[in-house]
Image (cartoon, rainbow, N blue to C red):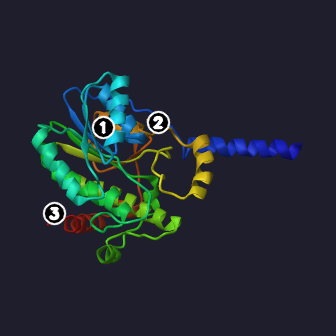
Amino acid sequence: MFQLVLGVLVIGLVYVLLVETLFKKSQCKGKREMSGRTVIITGGNTGIGKATAMELAGRGARVILACRNQQKAESAISDIMKVTGSTDVVYMQLDLSSLRSVRSFTEIFLKAEPRLDLLINNAGLIADGRTEDGFGIEFGVNHLGHFLLTCLLLDRLKESPEGRVITMSSMAHRWGKIDFDALVANKDLGTGRYSWQFFQAYCNSKLCNVLFTHELAKRLKGTNVTCYSVHPGIVKTELSRHVSLWQKVFIEPVAWLLFLDPTTGAQTTLHCALQEGIEPLSGRYFSCCAAQDVSAKAKDDAVAKKLWEVSERLSGLC
């Protein structure tokens, strides 16, 4: 009996520890006015992206869901309009696994929309495979597609009184690494048919997100645009929809017990979108609605600059 009680206590303590650390909740308190502002959210048809779109639409923003799947996007728009009463939420087709699609999206957007105030690079995946252009899918979608999208929209963002770029990263960036020789030779930062291999590639892509934001902030100095990378928490979303069945059997019970819901997971993104006075923190990494320190490799000036230059070449910007 004593052992049973002790076991229950230990499990309870572990649960509380996890809830207060890895699965800690936070709340955005930003009051930035959004009426009249235009927002692009990639992957805004589900999960954190949809929760973010819901909040920003409710605050009066014009929200553009930049998504690959039109049916899912239109369903999300219907939900958002029903909840918020907004009639200013629209779908624009964007497939981040295709650089051609990224260019087409930006061309159409720049012709149709007179302003852009907030770009949220939210979409991401954990999977194996290749993009239309032959890049590893995680590097291509999570980093390179968003890199090109951001670069092509920067001039329009600079026309906003206070433009912001928010890029979804993850605490997984801590386990990431960037092998530039492999990237140039193989057009990926890791691949393979085993789950641990494409999880490592995911970590590498999330490190790219943090380094991209670090370098972008340097290049935006002297403008009215700021940028932030975000760890949303460990959230129950469709991010792992491509993992194997046995992994889902393991993940689902843990997710049900501990993972944050998408609305809670959207709070740090919303903080970076809505909080006033964070402009001096441009380029920083945020978690739990606060700037956090990162390891030396996640703010290495030389690596961030090299990643930018390599990304320019791979995306056809130079």
Q: Mark 1 = which residue?
A: 273
Label 1 close to label 2 by CB (< 8 Å): no
Tell me the kind of residue under disc 2. Answer: Thr
Name the secondary structure under disc 3.
loop
Write down the quadrant of residue 43 in the picture: top left
Residue under the image location 40 percent in, 41 percent down: 46
The earlier-in-sequence mark between 3 and 2 is 2
Q: Position of residue 104 (x, y in %)?
A: 17, 52
Answer whether residue 220 is visible to the viewer in this image: no
- Disc with the residue nearer the chain's start (1 vs 2): 2
Whole-Å distance between the Cαs marked 3 and 2? 36 Å
- Mark 2 secondary-structure assignment: helix
State the image coordinates of residue 305 (x, y, percent, origin top left).
Answer: 24, 65
Tell me the residue at 39%/58% (across/down): 206
Please, what is the three-letter code of the amino acid marked with disc 3? Leu
Q: Which residue is mark 2?
A: 264
